[in-house]
Image (cartoon, rainbow, N blue to C red):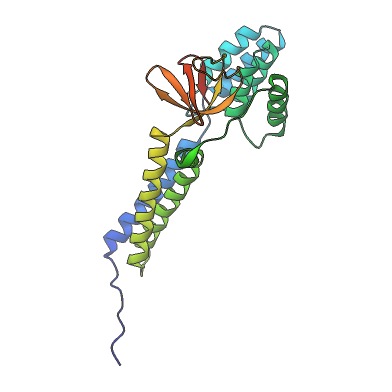
Amino acid sequence: MSPRHTPSTPPLRVRLAALGLTIAAAVFTLAAADGGDRSLEALEAGNAAFLAGDLDRALGVYQRAWSPQRAHPTLIYNLGTTWHHKGDLPQAVLWYRRGDADDPWLQENLWLARRSLGSERLPPAGVVGWLSHRHRILSVLAIACAWSALLALALPRPAPRAALLGAGLGVLLYAGAWAADRWGPQPGVVLEVCDGGATVLPAGTEAWVRRSGDIWRVAGVPDARCGADTVALVHP
């Protein structure tokens, strides 16, 4: 009977380093997810202006406090509602799209704005569109694979091949997500009528777009050309 092969255990310093990286990644993720910023302070001032009927001032307060990286969900909801009250439904759709997809009030307002506009929602086109539509999910899976690999290295008896496979898969997923996010089409809202080509897209159209110089190209509508100021990304 041949002797059984036992995988060697990495040195203690390697396991401790991997465990430290895992903890640091967790702390960094929690810190990035913290929404405790000045947007909370702006809500009271913006809400007071809104209740007083000064919608322009309310918009100014809300928008100065908004940041793509950190934004309180109520702030985004209030931005959409204020634009809705002003009668600018494409802007309302844009901000409702930026809000919490699980908020039933927001989703009802989004449905009302869409129904009033009667505009289209164009799906992503092709493989690149499919990747772009799911690039956030790919990023989450990549992070999960990387964490699993780090934890495997931190254990007393890791499975080296599994750790390497997990790390490799994480790199591939992250690279795919990054490429889709960098070069693929992004969800956007047409804020003004786009008639730069044979196809006319009305204001409020929700489409997947890609910047090309000073115009926006619309996925699935190759003859559509929209000006730089006519489209806004849902996730800027």
| Residue depicted at x 46% and y 42% | 127
Q: Quadrant of the N terminus?
A: bottom left
For the question of whether residue 135 can be seen, the reply is: no
Percent x, y for residue 6?
31, 78
**x and y, in percent, of residue 53 in the image:** 70, 7
Residue closest to the eye, 235 or 222: 222
Mark count: 0
Residue positioned most to the front: 198
Which percent across, then down, holds residue 155?
38, 65
- In the image: residue 196, left or right of residue 96: left
Determine whether, in the image, residue 53 is placed left or right of residue 34.
right
Q: Residue at x 71, y 34 (%)?
A: 104
Q: Quadrant of residue 166?
A: bottom left
> Is 159 situated above or below 107?
below
Q: Which residue, as the protein is rendered here, is positioned at the far bottom?
A: 1
Q: Residue at x 65, y 23 (%)?
A: 119
Confirm whether residue 191 shows in the render.
yes
Q: Nearer the viewer, residue 71 or 218?
A: 218
Counting from the top left corner in percent of width and height, residue 74 is at: 63, 26
- Against 169, residue 58 (above or below) is above
Residue 149 as seen in the image, left or right of residue 12: right
Position of 117 with respect to 76 (left or right) is right
Comparing 200 with 120, the one in front is 200
